[in-house]
Image (cartoon, rainbow, N blue to C red):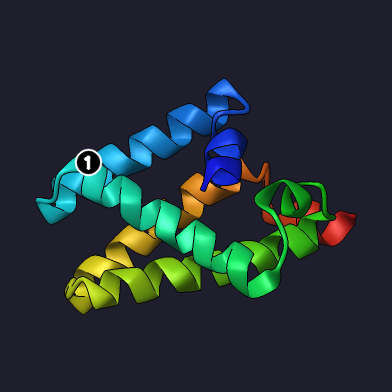
Amino acid sequence: MTEINQFISSSVEKINAFQSMVEQLSRESNLCRSAINDLGFAALHEWETQKGSSLSHLAMQQPAQRVRGLDQIIGYFEKCMQENTWSDSMIQKNLVLIRQTLETIFEIRSDTEIFSG
């Protein structure tokens, strides 16, 4: 988890994006921020464990590879939310926010970047 914390705290943009996501998800779910923060870190840790790779390594990949990794991480977020008995509609709504946050964190600028590289 220390590696994840270091990755998120490696830039102001990443910190702000993650904190903003935590606050919005906290309001939407009526859960405290620390619970949402833990959920986020659990999803990121699950991806690292399953892939045997670090978030820092993913961030250095080509845009298309970062998008595939991002999709997998979002799947882990969804699994964590289902395990915490969030409604399907709440999950779908919040997955949009999570995707936007991860696109900021992993510097995925737009769909055109994915296909032009």
Residue at coordinates 21% horizontally, 73% vertically from top-left?
A: 89
Query: In the image, 86: left or right of 106?
Result: left
Residue denoted by label 1:
33
Q: In the rendered image, which quarter is residue 96 located in?
A: bottom left
- Check disc 1 and give the amino acid type: Arg
Vertical arrangement, residue 62 with respect to residue 23, above or below: below
Residue that protrudes farthest toward the left in the picture: 30
- Label 1, residues with CA under 10 Å away: few <14, some 14-19, many ≥20: some
The residue depicted at 46 percent of the width and 71 percent of the height is 76
In this picture, is 34 found above or below 86? above
State the residue in front, 100 or 47. Answer: 47
Q: Residue at x 72, y 61 (%)?
A: 53
Left of 87 or right of it: where is 43? right
| In the foreground, 39 or 13 | 39
Farthest-out residue, right: 117
What residue do we see at 23% from left, 78% from top? 88
Is residue 72 positioned above or below 5 on the image?
below
Q: Choose top left, top right, bottom left or bottom right for residue 86.
A: bottom left
* Residue 45 in picture, x, y percent from top left: 52, 59
Regarding residue 71, the answer to whether it shows in the image is no
**SS under mark 1:** helix
Residue 7 appears in the figure: yes
Q: Position of residue 27 (x, y in %)?
A: 15, 44
> Position of 62 compared to 98: left or right?
right
